[in-house]
Image: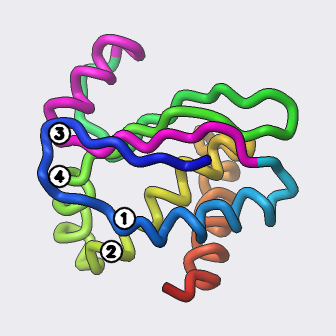
Amino acid sequence: MIQYFYENITETVDQNYKIWLQDIIVSEQKKIGEINYIFCDDEYILKVNQDYLQHDYYTDIITFDYVKGKTISGEIFVSLQRISDNASILSKDYEDELRRVLAHGILHLCGYKDKSGEEEREMRNKEDYYLNKYSG
């Protein structure tokens, strides 16, 4: 089950994205466990980054992986403020950037990494593939 939670923001995210995210999991031949998206502002995600990862910088997403076998579970923190800023900087549509980040978190839980250049290219290709399949 995919659930949405909100911290320090009033903006909400389209509930229909959950169906698309579940489709990504099934397409990756995984099972849906407990996945919590925590949507927040920059300051909230910065504190999570500092407290749990000892990183002192802003980011758009932090994924905590609780996957067991093929069952995908985790907590995905998403800064809507950072997504808005990134969309503006990259001259992208806000909703497109949001969907990319939502898919990115799910793909991490499915086992994809993005530390090396090759891993990053594979992650971006998967994001693009699933973004193209989105039929909102």
Mark 4 to mark 1 CA distance (whole Å):
11 Å
Answer whether labels 3 and 1 touch (C-beta < 8 Å): no
Residue furthest out toward the bottom: 135
Q: Identify the amino acid type marked 1.
A: Leu
Mark 3 to mark 1 CA distance (whole Å):
15 Å
Q: Residue at x 38, y 38 (%)?
A: 77
Q: Earlier in the sequence, mark 3 or mark 1?
A: 3
Whether residue 81 appears in magenta in the rendering, the answer is: no
Q: Which residues are the magenta region?
A: 32-54
Q: Identify the amino acid type marked 4.
A: Gln
Q: Residues within 10 Å of mark 1 (few under 14, many from 20)?
A: many
Q: Residue under circle 2?
A: 95
Q: Identify the amino acid type marked 3.
A: Asp
Residue 31 lies left or right of residue 120; in this view the side is right
Residue 110 lies left or right of residue 11; in this view the side is right
Q: Residue under circle 3?
A: 42
Q: Residue at x 69, y 52 (%)?
A: 118
Q: Residue under circle 4?
A: 81
Where does residue 3 sit, x and y in percent of width and height? 48, 46
Answer whether labels 4 and 1 touch (C-beta < 8 Å): no
Q: Earlier in the sequence, mark 4 or mark 3?
A: 3
